[in-house]
Image (spheres, rainbow, N blue to C red):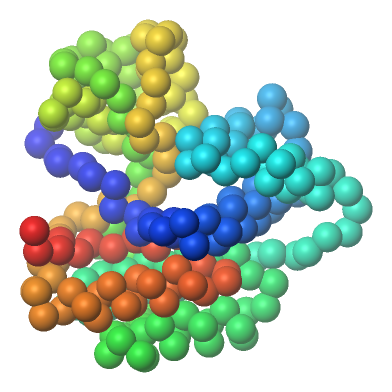
Amino acid sequence: MGRSFEVRKASMAKTAAQKSKLYSRYGKQLYVLAKNSGADPVANPSLQSLIERAKKEQVPSHVIEKALEKASGAGGEDYTPARYEGFGPGGCAVIIDCLTDNNNRTITDVRNCFTKTSSKMGAPGSVAHSFDHLAVLRFGGEDADPTLEALLMAEVDVTDVECEDGNVTVFAPANEFFKAKQAVLEAFPDTEFDVEEITFVPQTRTEITVDDVPMFDKFMNMLGDCEDVQDVYHNAILPS
């Protein structure tokens, strides 16, 4: 259907030194999800999916187990989600998802990232309208039609299915994630997903000039260093 896809979520683990940030990020996400929805992965598909994603990113088992044990106990931290939006270097649209136990600290840290890179923090909803909130599944394949047929037979509300470079990519509304994944696995039991996530996919892209690249990299690195930032989504196209 003509929609090209690449992973547009900014990585928080570009170097070995940032692995602790990655572990902390997954630990916090696992804790919050298990605390709010139950720490048993069998009864909590969202938790099971997050655990699988953490393992794919080589998060150690002890980090996962510690987060689940902590969530099963009494008390613990009280994290709440926070989302910030704005325009990064080169005018690219940016969405920043956080988990925080101190809103004042988090918004100050995020605002500094914008301010110190000559970027502009926007009001809630200022750029979200230019992204689609989608479930994305990608796996090896040479033909999109059998996948589309399986999804339609399972009554999945499919947004798009494409086949490109030996991969089939499924796009569906965010709330259809588990239904779409189960439909694919039932039709093709040996499927191994390269991508299985709920993400923000930009409707349009913004080309970043060579001159803007250093500031863009600084912006992303600063966000990566923020304690409460979990995921960063943008629509930038960097020079090749």
- Nearer the observer, 128 or 170: 170
Does any portion of residue 114 appear in the rendered image?
Answer: yes
Task: Out of 14 and 159, give the one closest to the viewer.
Answer: 14
Please identify the residue farthest to the right as the structure is shown. Answer: 74
Would you say 227 lies left or right of 207 here?
right
Q: Quadrant of the C terminus?
A: bottom left
**Depth order, front residue of 1/59:** 59
The quadrant where residue 114 appears: bottom left
Expressed as whole percent of the image width and height from the top left, the position of residue 229 reads 51, 67
Left or right for 92, reference 49: left
Residue 101, x across and y down, in percent: 69, 72
Q: Residue at x 41, y 59 (%)?
A: 15
* Position of the N terminus by quadrant: top left
Q: Quadrant of the rendered structure where residue 135 is?
A: top left
Q: Where residue 33 sits: x, y (%)?
A: 66, 47
The relative height of residue 113 versus residue 78 in the rendered view (above or below) is below
